[in-house]
Amino acid sequence: MSWSPDGRFIVYYQVEPKTKRDLWVLPLDGICVGRVGRL
């Protein structure tokens, strides 16, 4: 898990057998709840 340089996002890297490598990005702007995305 890591913070973006500007502090606006938490980035999480996960390895799953089914999807291989997932990069999750969680915005911390507080505007829209549940807006987690997988890249």
Image: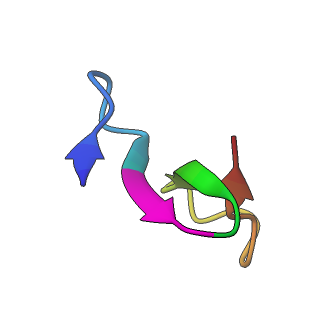
Residue 24 is situated, as x and y percent measured from the top left of the image, at 55, 54
Q: Nearer the viewer, residue 27 or 15?
A: 15
Q: Residue at x 73, y 77 (%)?
A: 34
Q: Which of 38 and 26 is in front in this view?
A: 38
Residue 18 is situated, as x and y percent measured from the top left of the image, at 69, 69
Question: Magenta segment, principal secondary structure?
Answer: strand
Image-based side of 2 in relation to 18, left or right = left
Position above or below: 13 against 6: below
Q: Quadrant of the C terminus?
A: top right
Q: Residue at x 68, y 64 (%)?
A: 36
Residue segment shown in magenta: 12-17
Residue 13 falls inside the magenta stretch: yes
Residue 18 falls inside the magenta stretch: no
Position above or below: 10 against 14: above
Position above or below: 29 against 39: below
Q: Which residue is drawn at 39% across and 51% down?
A: 13
